[in-house]
Image: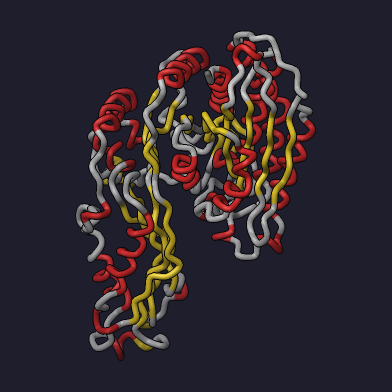
Amino acid sequence: MTARLPDAALDTTQALEHVSHAWDTDIVARLTDYVAIPAKSPMFDSAWDANGLLETVVRNTAQWVELQKVAGLSVEIIRLPGRTPVLFFEVAATRSAALATTQTVLMYGHLDKQPEFSGWRKDLGPWTPKYEGGKLYGRGSADDGYAAYAAIAAIQALKSQGVGHPRIVGLIETCEESGSYDLMPYIDALRPRLGEVGLVVCLDSGAGNYDQLWLTNSLRGMVSGVLKVEILTEGVHSGDASGLVPSSFRIMRQVLDRLEDSTSGRLLPASFHCEVPSERLAQAQATADILGDEIYKRFPWAHYDCGGSTQFALPTTTDPLQALINRTWNPTLSVTGVEGMPELSNAGNVLRPYTAFKLSLRLPPLVEAAPAVAQLKALLEDNAPYQARVTFEKAAGATGWNAPTTAPWLESALDAASKAHFGASCGFIGQGGTIPLMNMLSLGFPKAQMMVCGVLGPKSNAHGPNEFLHVPYAKKLTAAVAQVIASLP
């Protein structure tokens, strides 16, 4: 049995020094090794089981955790048949009897990665890590390989000062970038071991800047799938057939016009929209006041020379508040992949037999994904122009998340941690991406408080080229997490 420690307050300066040492002497090197492994999520590697790369990163992380010799910690890799592996760790509570609590802290992250994408800087690459100017470049460094290492470092910071802490468990999955479809079976299997979850620390989100701690207060949901328009069985001479055979691309445009106003980008079905809660509007206004035009300037806008001056592509809005609402509470459509089109260098005068688009539809936090998937499929497939074959396949969805009301103790702890390590108050920001786990956990543990945070700040570019982990911010975030855990009543 783990001995109960005397109650002690956390020295925040020592905590930051402790985690900074761990990052500098060990964690950056471990993450450098991790970046070099192309452990792509199952959606992007159908042979993931045979390739064994997800298994490798989970095993490497588990071995590192074991080497830390954290008092009271046990770690194991859990494998359900046919599903991606999960790393699970458990740390016994050490609080004195006077402050003992039955509540558990659940720490979450993931180790699977997005695919390579193009456009990396010449001296960088997705699987060629480079540490430069406090930034670790490479796929997965910030999304989300660091999470397991930061979680253990935060626990070590508490142990190093003899600060009593509640029971802590960790759940590190390998299916998040595919929608976490393997996660619920693991949660069901582990439910007796998870205990009474009082606080979830999710380390897979973003930051509005690198100057303060940021708490994510909402996440959009997502529907994705492949929309395919087929009009011919094989390509034909465009001069011979055009004007008689309708272009599959033109039909694709017509079909998408049912979904989106191409002029404004507004999604047309009313059911894909929801009202923004007044609390979120107030928090968005406060965040807009902090970040200002950096909300949209942070993106790599295209630019070109226009008569001796530089002209930049423009955002949909330059109003900071509206910009925040657009990227966190409005539904939007993105085409993330195309099939049926040859490379430009190989594009002859051929009317192509089909066009296929990979669609990614972001849903507001309060819109349920399952009915949206069904409605989207019917909207796109029914009454196809020219009786073309139109299909929306591989359709999947994940419901977004709106944070529960923040308990006074957590709000106080977050602000204290932000001031201690950043010298500024905690900020609250919605994220346009999706973390399927959060909705699952809110349903499974409705009384739990949620600390959803992460290192994906300006220009960190998760999923895109030149993704990086901002190590100085990660150090402070790690120390802040330790402080919040110690504050759990």
Return the x and y of residue 232 as percentages of the image width and height: 37, 86
Q: How is colour applied across the structure in the image?
A: secondary structure
25 vs 118: above or below: above
Q: Residue placed at 45% from the left, 18% from the top?
A: 409
State the residue in front, 152 or 265.
Answer: 152
Q: Residue placed at 42% from the left, 20% from the top?
A: 411
**Res 461 visible:** no
Q: Quadrant of residue 235?
A: bottom left
Which residue, as the protein is rendered here, is positioned at the far bottom? 240
Return the x and y of residue 139 as percentages of the image width and height: 58, 46
Q: Residue placed at 58% from the left, 53% from the top?
A: 185
Q: Residue placed at 54% from the left, 49% from the top?
A: 176
440 vs 74: above or below: below
224 vs 327: above or below: below
- Total numbered labels: 0
Q: Is residue 215 left or right of residue 250?
A: right
Q: Quadrant of residue 228?
A: bottom left
State the residue in front, 482 or 368.
Answer: 368
Q: Is residue 208 left or right of residue 8?
A: left
State the residue in front, 485 or 330.
Answer: 485
Return the x and y of residue 360 as percentages of the image width and height: 39, 57
Return the x and y of residue 463 as percentages of the image width and height: 50, 48
Q: Quadrant of the N terminus?
A: top right
Q: Is residue 435 left or right of residue 471?
A: left
**Res 2 visible:** yes
